[in-house]
Image (cartoon, rainbow, N blue to C red):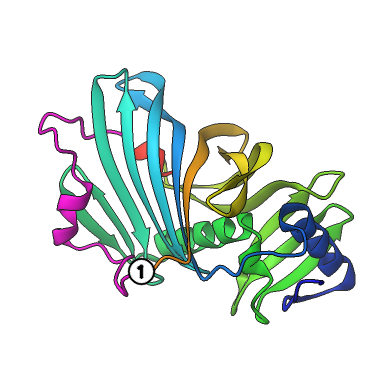
Amino acid sequence: MPFLLLTQGDPIGLDLLKKLVDKRYGGSPPALDALRVTYRGWSAARLGPLPLRAAVEAVATYRFPFQIRWDFTVRMLRIFSSRYTTAFDGQAVYEVQGGRVTRNTEENGVDSARARAWSEAVYFISPMIADHAVRVQSVDNHAFRVFAPDMPQIAALVRLNEDHTLAAVEIERMDPNDNRVKLQRLKPAGDLIRVDGLILPQYLERYWDDTLAMRLSPVRVELNPALEPDAFTLKSEDLLAVLHEDDEADSGGSSAAS
């Protein structure tokens, strides 16, 4: 049975979207209102002036389309370890690092977080097809833009391979490492695999412009988990959940949030 496509757009863009969904999920794309994915992999990091690859364990939690939370554990050289959390509840950006909670409502930070949340929703594909307010616009025979629901100023560029599998999701947003606006690319790598009932690429790669910043592999998935209303609003009592048990843990690792 053909899947129901609620997305609006021009015929070429909608046809590309249908082919993309079919390549990822076949005729049965999952209905995703919320999602939690546990990853393992690495992130670019620095120890003083030295560039390193830090081992990363991360949990990404979503309430689509715009609420997002990432909880990171970062380890460098098997010696230094830190935890870091960043979240966006739709109105403010929250960060917890080194025992300190910050809340940011500045326009640039909020716009960047909203763009990040939308690009990651697009990466999972299914959230694009279940909302009449989402619109696609073809660019060429292997690319289309997808505009966020009720926020047409936020648009991700979806690039497809020749076989109509996903090649990349691109969006411009502020890199939190240097506060410069860059092109963020989310690129799948490896084969498609099934993790706890969800079909995902074997690896998720995040680029800033042409620089690979992170490579993660999904190891656990929770489909439509029950989330507390304030799951994306970090408060001081959240510290016990994100601080490392080791009092000597290094407070670095913010690059993993990029």
Q: Which residue is rendered at x = 75% and y = 75% of the image?
A: 5
The one of 97 and 242 positioned closer to us in this rendering: 242
Describe residue 215's horizontal placement relative to residue 52 as left or right: right
Stretch of the chain drawn in magenta: 227-253
Query: Residue 91, image x and y in percent?
Result: 37, 72
Amino acid type, mark 1: Leu
Residue of label 1: 227
The one of 191 and 84 positioned closer to us in this rendering: 191
In the image, residue 242 above or below residue 153: above
Q: Residues within 10 Å of mark 1 (few under 14, many from 20)?
A: some
Q: Which residue is rendered at x = 34% and y = 53% of the image?
A: 86
Residue 29 shows in this picture = yes
Residue 177 shows in this picture = no
As for residue 127 lying within the magenta part, the answer is no
Q: Which residue is rendered at x = 36% and y = 25% of the image?
A: 46
Q: Which residue is rendered at x = 35% and y = 58% of the image?
A: 87
**Residue 155 picture quarter:** bottom right
Farthest residue, direction left: 247
Helix, strand or loop at label 1? It is loop
Q: Quadrant of the N terminus?
A: bottom right
Describe residue 212's horizontal placement relative to residue 126 as left or right: left
**Residue 50 picture quarter:** top left
Query: Residue 20, image x and y in percent?
Result: 77, 57
Describe residue 118's horizontal placement relative to residue 110 as left or right: right
Q: Quadrant of the C terminus?
A: top left
Describe residue 22's horizontal placement relative to residue 131 as left or right: right
In the image, residue 21 above or below residue 242: below
